[in-house]
Image (tube, rainbow, N blue to C red):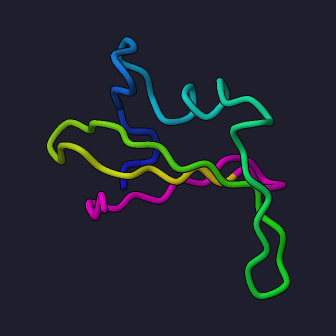
């Protein structure tokens, strides 16, 4: 994935992934433990240019936001 792609989420204006992540509230981030490591994650359906509809997982980690994308919407 590009380092900061332009996305569309729920009819909002175009914004990059970091802008969207910064708008997430603490309630939208879910605390998850994976192999003993704690993460704060949020999964959103967004539209990305050249890709279309995708699932975007935002991980709020100590060194900033990390983004994971999947075209598997189900």
Main structural element of the magenta stretch: helix, strand or loop? strand
Q: Residue furthest front?
A: 74
The picture quadrant where one finds residue 14 is top left
**66 magenta-colored:** yes
Q: Position of residue 40 (x, y in %)?
A: 75, 55
Where in the figure is residue 11, as x and y percent of width and height? 33, 16
Would residue 28 be found to the left or right of residue 33 on screen?
left
Q: Position of residue 23 (x, y in %)?
A: 65, 24
The quarter of the displayed image where residue 15 is located: top left
* Residue shown at the point (47%, 43%) measured from the top left: 44
Q: Residue furthest bottom?
A: 35
Q: Residue furthest top?
A: 13
Answer with left or right where residue 34 lies relative to residue 17.
right
Looking at the picture, does residue 61 appear above or below residue 11?
below
Q: Is residue 45 left or right of residue 25?
A: left
Magenta-colored span = 60-74
Quadrant of the drawing holding the N terminus: bottom left
Is 27 located above or below residue 1 in the figure? Answer: above
Residue at (85, 84) in percent of width and height? 36
């Amino acid at each position: 994935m590009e380092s900061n792609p332009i996305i569309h989420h729920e009819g909002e204006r175009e914004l990059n992934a970091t802008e969207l992540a910064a708008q997430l509230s603490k309630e939208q981030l879910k605390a998850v433990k994976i192999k003993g490591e704690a993460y704060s994650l949020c999964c959103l359906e967004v539209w990305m240019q050249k890709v279309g509809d995708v699932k975007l997982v935002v991980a709020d980690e100590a060194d900033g936001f990390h983004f994971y994308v999947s075209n598997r919407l189900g």
